[in-house]
Amino acid sequence: MMRILITSGPTREYLDPVRYLTNASSGRMGCAVAQAALEAGHEVVIVSGPVEIGYPCQAQVIWVVTTEQMCRACLAEFDRCDGVIAVAAPCDYRPVRQAKHKLRKTGSGRVLRLVETPDILARLGERKRHQWMVGFALETERAQERAWQKLQQKQCDLMVVNGPAAMNAADTQIEILDRQGEVVARLSGPKQEVARHLFRIISDRLIRPHQPPAR
């Protein structure tokens, strides 16, 4: 049995007390991957942004809101985990300043100054020792090329490529890239079914090679 860290859902970066930057990630794929890992007999820790779905009761769930909070939670859990599946879609930018009061209309435009948020997977890649890592790359152009670049930069072992149509949807379509940039598999269908196929590939390629041989 392995202890697997799974990130899931979106994060929020507040502009003022009521408005925020985010995306349409629902957490469904993260939930499906967690269920597949549990069905395979592993221990699962989920770090999730705000979602309306319910996660499997057998999993430990750590709730966060911002990308910085998700990053801190993942770093706190990482050393105690054997592998990471980073399904979450955290915000890449946050405002330089969060307004203390609701931003009101002034009759003219408003310029927002944004800065990058922490790159969670890259931070984990810098600290990896024995762990294996699987990332998700949502791309709208040159998907394989950019996903493979991310795999290398973040020191992942596999990268799952999907598109914006997967967000807040019951079905998904993915490609799985290995460290050589080769497509290991192309999967499509309900997220629960795709997650089970994905986890079987993760198990064959990453989990079993890390397990000691049976005596």
Image (tube, rainbow, N blue to C red):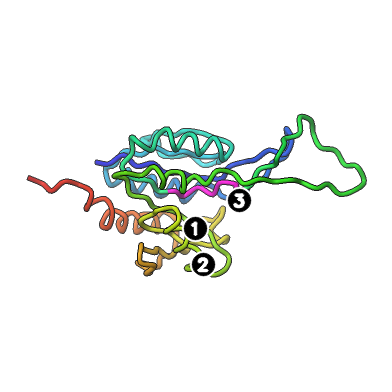
Q: Nearer the viewer, residue 170 or 119?
A: 119
Q: Quadrant of the N terminus?
A: top left
Q: Amino acid at mark 1?
A: Ala
Quarter location, residue 198 = bottom left
- Give the structural element (helix, strand or loop) at label 1: strand
The residue identified by callout 2 is: 143
Q: Which mark is residue 24?
A: 3
Image spot of residue 106 (x, y percent): 91, 42
Looking at the image, residue 107 sits to the left or right of residue 99; the answer is: right
Q: Which residues are magenta?
A: 86-92
- 1 and 2 marks in contact (CB < 8 Å): yes
Going from N to C along the chain, the mark reached first, 2 or 3, is 3
The 10 Å Cα crowd at callout 3, few under 14, some 14 to 19, many 20 or more, is some
Q: Amino acid at mark 2?
A: Ala
Image spot of residue 190 (x, y percent): 45, 58
Frontmost of labels 1 and 3 is: 1
The residue identified by callout 1 is: 137
